[in-house]
Amino acid sequence: MLISSDFDSGNIEVLDASNPRQVRLAMRPDLNSHHFQWFHFKVAGMSPGQRYGFSLCNAGQSAYRQAWSGYDAAASYDQANWFRVPSRFEAGALRFELEPREAQVWFAYFEPYSRARHDWLIGQALEKAGAELFACGKSIEGRDIQLLRIRRTPEARRKIWIIAQQHPGEHMAEWFMEGLIERLQDQDDAELNELLAQAELYLVPNMNPDGAFRGHLRTNAAGKDLNRAWQSASEAESPEVFFVQQQMRRVGVDLFLDIHGDEEIPHVFTAGCEGNPGYSPRLAALEDEFRRRLVDIGAEFQTAFGYPRDEPGQANLTLACNAVGEEFDCLSFTIEMPFKDHDDNPEPLTAWNGRRSKRLAQDVLSVAAAMVGTLR
Ligand code: GEM
Ligand code: ZN
């Protein structure tokens, strides 16, 4: 049996694989950081039908140790079709077993979104969705941070920004962006045409390519949490945020969506700007309408569960959602998808996955189309 992780977003350390029924593994922390929770590894040379057992032995020291309860590991025989393996958190380790039907299997914290698929997605956007490469920044290790613009109507006044995967282990975020770009390829989409008659879209499909490729959970190659860098971005340590902020100030922002994943809460939800100093009845009403419309169109979304609301004036302005909402006085959300399942509509075989992330994005576009005329 051979266990490997030396590939795009791979992350595992083998402690002891001498007993196939009790393979002891550990997650590797982000570079220059203590954060870890993401894992992604391949097991080859297995005997189909034999039972194998795996333990992530340092799960109890991970960034969100309380999030392992109710979590099931993702697995795939072909890296395309992913399913969940019943898992349990006990004695500080995440444990799961499998009687594989094939000799090799991949395990991951969530259905991975690879850099190769990212490159394909950028091509799809440019060739089929009417996107242009508006600007291109560079990550610390020199990977492209593409800023795509979709402009169908030069007179369109509204600027809608959607960025994804500041936190590199939150792979559902770029699946969401794929859903956006897929829908943008439909030239006969009345809602979309209505949206693009009034707005330009500015999309950053992956804010943290270094972290994603390195199998990080939370930080970039300098160990920085990009979603805590929006008041102190620097070209040296957080060039990814520095670049996007620069472009936002060049263009303006009328609606901002920051796409994330949440380790613990088994629901899709949003976090708004209620704690911002500049939060107003206008923004409160827009936030309520956005959430209500998302529920009303039957999206996999709910408002009963989420982060505690910030107290008035107590928002952490180092977060993208709060920083952008405050600076541009605009509707601004963090959109959270679960690493577990969306328990309002559970799908035990797959739990939350790439397909559902894509569908949510397409529903979000419908809500943006309905609200584009009232953003200001
Ligand atoms: C979260 S955003 C936290 C937002 N909290 C409130 N109360 N608005 C983060 O960066 O910690 C997003 C994430 O990590 O998914
Ligand atoms: Zn996040």
Image (cartoon, helix red, strand yellow):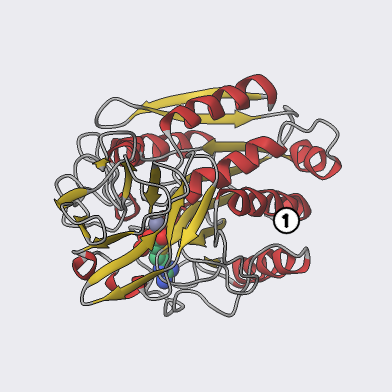
The part of the image, by quadrant, that contains residue 252 is: top right
Identify which residue, 176 or 313, lies in the foreground. 176
Q: Is mark 1 within 8 Å of ligand 1?
A: no
Vertical position of residue 373 compared to residue 211: above or below? below
Q: Tell me the quadrant of the picture where the C terminus can be found.
A: bottom right
Q: On the rendered structure, is 286 left or right of 63?
A: right
Q: Tag 1: residue type?
A: Val
Please give the name of the residue rendered at 57% of the width and 67% of the height, measured from the top-left corner.
348
Please give the name of the residue rendered at 52% of the width and 49% of the height, measured from the top-left corner.
82
Identify which residue, 128 or 49, lies in the foreground. 49
Please give the name of the residue rendered at 65% of the width and 19% of the height, measured from the top-left corner.
127
Residue 376 visible (yes or no): no
Q: Which residue is mark 1?
A: 367
Vertical position of residue 139 compared to residue 40: above or below? above
Identify which residue, 151 or 367, lies in the foreground. 367
Q: Please tell me whether mark 1 sits on a helix, a strand or a loop.
A: helix
Identify which residue, 67 or 146, lies in the foreground. 67
Question: Where is residue 143 shown, x and y percent of the image?
Answer: 33, 26
Residue 78 visible (yes or no): yes
Q: On the rendered structure, is 357 left or right of 106?
A: right
Question: Where is residue 81 shown, x and y percent of the image?
Answer: 55, 45
Please give the name of the residue rendered at 36% of the width and 50% of the height, measured from the top-left corner.
169
Dividing the image into four quarters, tell me where ligand 2 lies. bottom left
Q: Tell me the quadrant of the picture where the N terminus can be found.
A: top left
Q: On the rendered structure, is 291 left or right of 246?
A: right
Vertical position of residue 102 compared to residue 141: above or below? below
> Badge 1: few (under 14), some or many (20 or more) residues near its Cα, within 10 Å?
many
Question: Where is residue 364 shown, x and y percent of the image?
Answer: 67, 53
Question: Where is residue 239 shown, x and y percent of the image?
Answer: 29, 35
In the image, farthest residue toward the top: 127
